[in-house]
Image: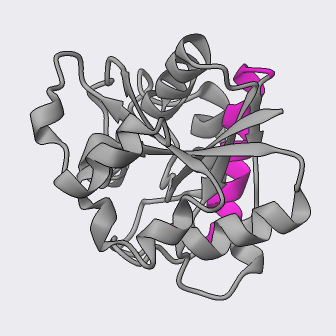
Amino acid sequence: MKVGLLGGTFDPIHLGHSQMAKQLLAQTELDEIWFLPNKIPPHKAQPQASFAHRYNMVKLACTEHSAFKVCSIENELPSPSYTLHTLKALRTQYPLIKFSFIIGMDSAQSLPTWHHWRSIFDYCDIIACARPGWSADELSDDLHPLRANRRLAIVAINEADVASNTIRSAIKQGTIANQALNPSVIRYINQHRLYIGG
């Protein structure tokens, strides 16, 4: 089985995440996409919602597609949530699955700065999501050989104009982005009064 791993804080998960995952399922040979909520991301501001809340919201959002799953493995590992450590643990638990790690083109550009980044390819391939019209000139020189060897795939997707920080700001101001969130996620946020303070 071929599984795409989509990591993120998902604070909260929104329709932009699920739309991207659906496009990847349509354009690649992936059988499933597993959403991996970060416990403590090393390169981003820390999430406002707890891991448990973010995991529960992702689990609710995953019900919209049979090929979507949520994986809690980063909550079981030491912090911070380095990709390499996550991939090693997944390989141990699922030795027969072929994993591909899904990132945005901005993350692909910074990949050579990641923790032991070359070792990541011992455990998975990389799928980088690019906007339509992306040029190979934007790719770091370190990554061209990996693309030539098909360890790094570039997939053009149409990005939704939505961001988790914008959603959090709207909730704090007393509104909620109905067009950007799964209805079950909206209900969960309202039930637990997430993102209201702070």
Question: Is residue 96 left or right of 23 when viewed as pictured?
Answer: right
Q: Is residue 132 magenta?
A: no
Q: Position of residue 5 (x, y in %)?
A: 62, 46
Question: Is residue 165 left or right of 2 when viewed as pictured?
Answer: left
Label tally:
0
- Residue, x 62% and y 38% (percent of image)? 185
Occupied quadrant, residue 153: top left
Q: Nearer the viewer, residue 121 or 166?
A: 121
Q: Nearer the viewer, residue 65 or 198?
A: 65
Q: Nearer the viewer, residue 145 or 160?
A: 145
Q: Is residue 173 visible?
A: no
Q: Quadrant of the N terminus?
A: top right
Question: Is residue 68 left or right of 81 when viewed as pictured?
Answer: right
Q: Is residue 128 above or below residue 56?
A: above
Question: Is residue 109 left or right of 76 when viewed as pictured?
Answer: left
Q: Is residue 16 above or below residue 40?
A: above
- Residue, x 77% and y 39% (percent of image)? 69
Occupied quadrant, residue 28: top right
- Residue, x 37% and y 39% (percent of image)? 147
Q: Is residue 94 visible?
A: yes
Q: Quadrant of the C terminus?
A: bottom left
Range of residues picked out in magenta: 47-66
